[in-house]
Structures are given as C-alpha cells and as structure tokens.
Image (spheres, helix red, strand yellow):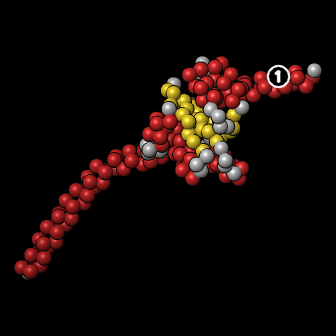
C-alpha cells in the first residue's frame, strides 16, 4: 500500500515538474528518439546544457497530463507517437537550440524533430525546420553592428581622403615655393 501511494506521489511530482518546465520557459521542441547510442545522447545533452538548455526523455502519459494542465492540449498528440519522446527546453535563443537539434538529427537517423511550442505559437516540423535556417542571435547582432559600422567607416574614409587631398595640396604648394627660391 505504501509503495502505491509513493508511486502516485512520484508521478505527480513528475507532472508538476514537466508543467513547470512547460510554463516557465519560452518554449520547447519535441523529438522522437530511436536506436541512438546512449553515449551519443549523453553528448547531445551536454551540448544542450552548455548552451543553457535541457534535453530529457519524457514519460508520454505524464507529459500528456502536463500539457493538458498547462493549456496546451493541442500538443498532446505528440505523446501518441510510437517512439520514445524527448523534449528540448528553450530558455533564450530558439534558433540556436533548434539548429543543434537539426544538426543532431542529420547525424542520427533515429532522431526526428516532431514539432514544438514557442512564444504562444505551436510549431509543426516545417516551422521548426524554417527556424533552424534563420541566423542565430549572435549572428543577427553581428549583422546589425556591421550594418551600423558601414556608414561610419565610409564617413571616416571620406574624411581621410579629404585630409589626404589637402595634405597633397599643401605639399605641392610647399614644393613649388621651395622651387621658386
């Protein structure tokens, strides 16, 4: 009898944790996992952790309860996949996390990105793929800085050219006066 109650408590704690992960983060991406070495999955989890995210395998029945309790029942169909289901948590930059997942999927045929949720939008596999093709946050910042730096560099170049022209004119006048003496 005690084991049964403990089992229910443990399951409820798992549902509560999943619900917290679902509601407290910007989003998440589901993937189905099959026939992948444990060492490869451990390496993937470490990369995800280094990027500020988490990846874990879900208990589908409990995930369905957590999704329904979080108001995301439209995603509960993900829990009906035949393969084991994993979830990547998106805390900051969704593009970086999704790129890592898509790269891992290219290397491992048993890893398939199934869809997800980000900023109030349900993402089907096509949307996830399109997100993975966008530049990441750091790349966007670099592009903006490069664009902002371009006009300033051009302006500095124009000023330097004007100063060079002025110096050439002064040197020419100086040489002309020295030649006349």
Q: Answer above or below: position of 170 versus 53.
A: below
Relative to residue 78, is residue 152 drawn left or right? Answer: left
Q: Quadrant of residue 156?
A: bottom left
Viewer-closest of 168 and 69: 69
Q: Is residue 97 visible?
A: no
User: The C terminus appears in which quarter of the rendering?
Assistant: bottom left
Q: Answer above or below: position of 91 versus 156.
A: above
Q: Residue at x 11, y 71 (%)?
A: 173
Q: Single out the residue that lies furthest toward the front.
A: 82
Residue that label 1 marks? 8
Q: Residue at x 42, y 48 (%)?
A: 142
Residue 128 coordinates in the image, percent (x, y) = 49, 37
Residue 165 coordinates in the image, percent (x, y) = 17, 64
Which element type, helix, strand or loop, lies under badge 1?
helix
Relative to residue 161, is residue 75 drawn left or right? Answer: right
Residue 17 coordinates in the image, percent (x, y) = 72, 28
């Amino acid at each position: 009898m005690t084991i049964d109650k403990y089992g229910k408590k443990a399951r409820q704690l798992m549902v509560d944790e999943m619900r917290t992960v679902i509601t407290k983060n910007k989003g998440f991406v589901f993937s189905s996992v099959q026939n992948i070495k444990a060492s490869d999955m451990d390496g993937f989890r470490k990369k995800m952790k280094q990027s500020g995210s988490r990846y874990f395998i879900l208990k589908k029945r409990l995930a369905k309860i957590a999704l329904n309790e979080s108001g995301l029942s439209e995603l509960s169909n993900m829990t009906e996949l035949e393969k084991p289901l994993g979830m990547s948590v998106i805390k900051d930059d969704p593009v970086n996390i999704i790129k890592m997942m898509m790269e891992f999927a290219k290397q491992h045929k048993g890893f398939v990105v199934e869809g997800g949720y980000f900023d109030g939008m349900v993402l089907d596999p096509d949307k996830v793929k399109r997100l993975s093709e966008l530049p990441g946050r750091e790349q966007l910042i670099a592009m903006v800085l490069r664009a902002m730096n371009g006009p300033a560099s051009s302006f500095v170049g124009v000023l330097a050219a004007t100063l060079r022209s002025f110096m050439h004119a002064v040197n020419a006048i100086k040489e002309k006066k020295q030649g006349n003496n």
